Amino acid sequence: MGTFILVVLAVMVLFIVLAIWQDAKRANMPPIVARSKVIERGFRDKMNEVEHFAWREVGLSFGRKLRYYVTFELENKEIVSLIVSADEYAALREGDIGEVAYRDTKFISWAAL
């Protein structure tokens, strides 16, 4: 039993170290800056409908937590969807043209042209 616990802890530590290493690797990547057009905006609940139902059934409500996203069409016709802040979401409109900067799937900035 003691050996099993040690193996489980070792695997957990390994996953944590790998996650930290991957985040550090992504943070050192140069950002991609590309001319683009905003083609879609939207938002999603962070919890799915089943979780919302479960929380309502027990009488708990923590309010809505929304995740905003914007979809860009880059100059090379590539489509990229990025999660943005509520302020960025409010500032961007479908059809806007400018330069988007992002790293991996993380939105960095937008500059209208």
Image (spheres, helix red, strand yellow):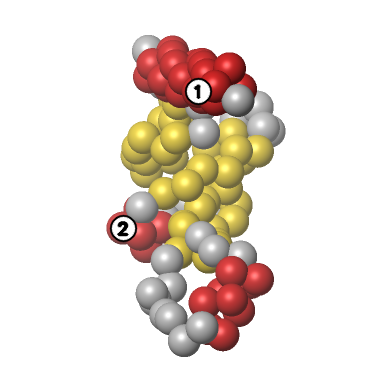
- Decide if residue 1 is on the left or right side of residue 65: right
Residue occupied by mark 2: 87
In this view, 88 is above or below 90: above
The residue sitting at 54% across, 64% down in the picture is 47
Q: Quadrant of the N terminus?
A: top right
- The residue to which callout 1 is attached is 9
**For residue 97, above or below residue 108:** below
Tell me the quarter of the picture where residue 3 sits.
top right
CA neighbours of label 1 inside 10 A, class few (<14), some (14 to 19), many (20+): few
| The one of 73 and 28 positioned closer to us in this rendering | 28
Q: Are marks 2 and 1 in contact (CB under 8 Å)?
A: no
Residue at image position (59%, 56%) is 40
Task: Report the front residue among 108 and 110.
Answer: 108
Q: Nearer the viewer, mark 2 or mark 1?
A: 1
Task: Give the mark nearest the N terminus, 2 or 1.
Answer: 1
Point 35% across, 59% down: residue: 86
Whether residue 94 sits left or right of residue 62 in the image: it is right
Q: Secondary structure at mark 2?
A: helix
In the foreground, 42 or 10: 10
Q: CA distance from mark 2 to mark 1?
A: 41 Å
Q: Residue 38 in the image: x percent, y percent?
A: 53, 49
For this orientation, the residue located farthest to the right is 77
Please, what is the three-letter code of the amino acid marked with disc 1?
Leu
| 86 is higher (above) or lower (below) than 77 | below
Element type where label 1 sits in the image? helix
